[in-house]
Image (cartoon, rainbow, N blue to C red):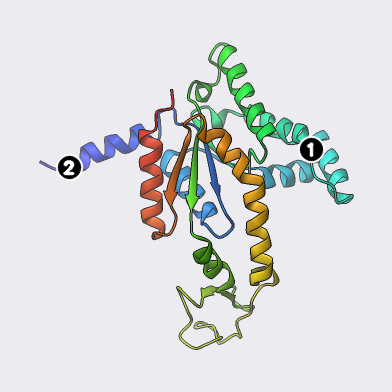
Amino acid sequence: MSTQAPLSVARVKKTERVVGPIILVGAPGAGKGTQAKLIAAEYAIPQISTGDLFRANVAQGTDLGLKVKQILSHGELVADGLVDDMVAHRLGEPDVNRGFILDGFPRTVGQAEWLDSYLKSRQADGGSAPFSAVSPIVVQIVVGYNHLLQRITGRRSCPTCGRIYNVYFQPPNGEGVCDLDGGRLFVRPDDTEAVVSERLKEYERQTLPVVEYYRARGQVVDVDGNQPVEAVAAEAFQAIEHADRV
């Protein structure tokens, strides 16, 4: 008997059932963006990035966007309340009803507390948002400090075709030269060790309190990000499938 039918049925169920909120965290270079896309495709749910929300609201000239544009033009940080409002507006759209991935939110404990309150209010309004009945899971992609440094500082880019190499993990055939067009590879200014080190310190300062907030509630699952992309994704899927989230 063929095994294809049961697999197909399982796949349909995975993309139809209520997944709930997934909060994805990971240091710069941990592969969070790649994993967010894989999880979104696996469960057919949207990835919600605060950066994308900022850009969309500014581009559309919404009231929230105009406020953000003014704040950023003065080099100031966008206040939690304004970010919360943008997220709330996005979570009012129908494509999130089964669940969603939050990327870049919550960044502070205050935002995490707001999200808890928001989900409770949506659950109390008569069940109009099925995702609110499932508690958030925080999937943290964990990669060692030295490995992160190699991933980022080892990047080399071709100015002509845009192809990206890594001198440690995916080097070009010829040192410093693109395999495709012979372009001289360069290092982006943000990929130097000094800059990366500061970015990682800032990430820890901002993110650790949020992770600990959720860990105290038993909602954090650590995923080994030192593995190949497919293995990391498989571990993330396993965490999402088996987490106690009611």
What residue is shown at x 87% (from left), y 50% (from top)?
Answer: 73
**Where 118 falls versus 43 (above or below)?**
above
Alpha-carbon span between mark 2 and mark 1: 52 Å
Q: Position of residue 204 (x, y in %)?
A: 62, 51
Q: Is residue 20 left or right of residue 79?
A: left
Q: Which residue is mark 2?
A: 3
Q: Name the residue: 39% across, 40% down.
A: 239
Quadrant of the rendering where the C terminus is positioned: top left
x then y, percent, for residue 20: 49, 29
Q: Position of residue 21 (x, y in %)?
A: 52, 32
Q: Residues within 10 Å of mark 2 (few under 14, many from 20)?
A: few
Secondary structure under the numbered disc 2 in the rendered image? loop
Amino acid type, callout 1: Ala
State left or right for residue 119 relative to residue 137.
right
Question: Which residue lies most toward the left here?
Answer: 1
Quadrant where the image shows the N terminus: top left
Q: Quadrant of residue 29?
A: bottom right
> Which numbered disc covers residue 79?
1
Would you call the spot at circle 1 few (<14 residues within 10 Å), some (14-19), or many (20 or more)?
few
Is the residue 78 above or below the residue 169 in the image?
A: above
Q: Mark 2 or mark 1, which has the lower sequence index?
A: 2
**Badge 1 element:** loop
Apparent side of residue 17 relative to residue 84 in the rendered image (left or right):
left
Q: Residue at x 43, y 48 (%)?
A: 223
Residue 246 is marked as none
Of residues 93 and 221, the one nearer the viewer is 221
Which residue is located at x 53 percent, y 15 percent? 127
User: What amino acid is labelled 2 in the image?
Assistant: Thr
Q: Position of residue 111 (x, y in %)?
A: 67, 33
